[in-house]
Image: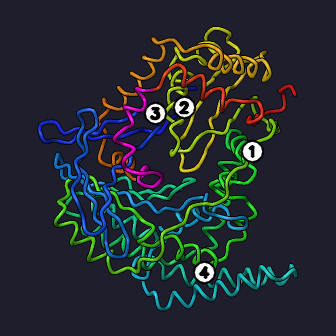
Amino acid sequence: MPGTRYLSTLFELRAGRPCPMINSVMRRILSLAVLASAGFVLAIAPCHGVELDIRELVLENGMRFLIVERHDSPVVSFNIVYLVGSVDERPGITGVSHFLEHMMFKGTKTIGTRNYRAEKKIIHEIRDLMERKDETDDEKARERLAVKIEKVRERQRKLIVKDEIWKIYRKNGAVGFNASTGRDYTSYTCSLPSNRIKLWAMLESDRMANPVFREFYAERDVVCEERRMRIDTDPRGALMERLYASAYMAHPYRWPVLGWASDISSYTPSEVERYFRRYYCPANAIAVVVGDVYMDRFSKLAEKYFGRIPGGSPAGRVVTREPPQKGGKRVRVDFDAEPRLTIAYHAPSVSSDDHYVMDIIATILSDGRTSRLYKRLVLEEQSALSAGAWFATRKYPGLFVFEAAPRKPHTIEEVRSSIDEVIEGLKKERTGEAELAKAKNKIEADFIRSRRSNSELAGHVAYFAAITDWRYIKTYIEKIRSVTPADIQEVAGRYFTDEARTIAVLGRTHEE
């Protein structure tokens, strides 16, 4: 399968019009933040003939806005990132960041309700009944309480305006109204006509300041079902969960973004609300605005609607470090599915220059039909239906993952042996100048060539604003160009070791 890398983004000003420049598949979404002590500043930073026109507005409460003016069309895309993800969780509440993503669509004190004062009493009544139900072991008592809870919920349904925030956005021409949760951050996206910027500011500041976690227990059940669908009953989902849980011993990257099943079913409103207050605050948020927006007008709206929200405290860094792996690991996931192999090696974070080399390695190994893994395993040996590798740059040290699906009658062990030989080739033989140049050109061409929408651009800016510094963008191509065959040998030799390897295999028909 093709390698997966986060897209990278730059801006080139041509004839006064900004053009995004994007890196290869799912790679490096570049941070365009220009730091300011207060107010906003305009920064223009050269990068191989490329200029950045990025403005940053910083409110007194600590909330940052990154604004890119693009007046090609009367559309604006928004992406609010909260600097919180599954890495910030702890045992007992794993998956709560993702759960909050769901709850943020439930509305506020004024949206999603016909009478919040009356509904608030019902919400507390449901919570009291649910606590009593969870605390008792008497099955008949639980059944009686379940009947009462359903009657109270029926009263609440009469007060709820279902999906009102979605309806408001849709009626005003919104597209891309969505959210996503990752290991390092949570984002909320939307694109609107540029004459609806004020509407976005009103709705999103209201969601930040006055969310109401209505239908809490029903949504908890929804997330439990989502986990069953995406992990428990999905072969690859189950395999990747076991791979991460095995590869990491201490670092919180080890638990799934969706959370462990027992944690999800145990969430309480009080602990979710505490988590929300800790992380969903202006000091821990960055809003990226791209499109037909004017800085002077937008700054007034931002101050009016977001500036009045108490700032809170920025989230701290995760202090737990993954200790060096002292020996190879191997795990098996029994599943009624075709066999599949994954191999993970510990990999550098975005703060290490080694990740540029990993970009090159991932491209050489897995980008296209002429890549080393695809060419050998799929085309030449025909031992695999798919074969590839991917590396996702993260805030903290991540994983470089190889994946392959053997083709019958070939086995997991045959495929693994071929992958090992490909890896050894990186270590022992200098990568040829032509192959290296091809990989660099591919990365740079993708980086420069692709023109994307405002929404994609906003997402790219938001991603790297969340995990690293904007200065990354100034030197990315320079760093890629500077990678040498010796660098590839050295990095591959240092990271791709048997001691630092975790193998996870799927299916009932593989060899041990």
Image quadrant holding the C terminus, namely top right
Extreme residue toward the left, this view: 15
The mark that comes first in sequence, 1 or 4, is 4
The mark that comes first in sequence, 4 or 2, is 4
- The residue identified by callout 1 is 242
- The residue identified by callout 2 is 358
Element type at mark 2: helix
Q: Is residue 396 left or right of residue 244?
A: left
* Badge 4: residue crowd in 10 Å (few <14, some 14–19, many ≥20): some
- The residue identified by callout 4 is 153
User: Which tag is nearer the camera, tag 4 or tag 2?
Assistant: 2
Q: What residue type is labelled 1?
A: Arg
- Above or below, comparing residue 331 to residue 279 in the picture: above
Element type at mark 3: loop
Structural distance between the alpha carbons of marks 1 and 4: 37 Å
Task: Report if residue 467 lies within the magenta region.
Answer: yes
Q: What residue type is labelled 4?
A: Arg
Q: Main secondary structure of the magenta part?
A: helix
Q: Which amino acid does label 2 sit on?
A: Met
Residue 25 got which mark? 3
The mark that comes first in sequence, 2 or 3, is 3
* Badge 2: residue crowd in 10 Å (few <14, some 14–19, many ≥20): many
Q: What stretch is highlighted in magenta?
A: 463-482
Q: Where is residue 455 in the image (x, y as percent from the top left)?
A: 33, 49
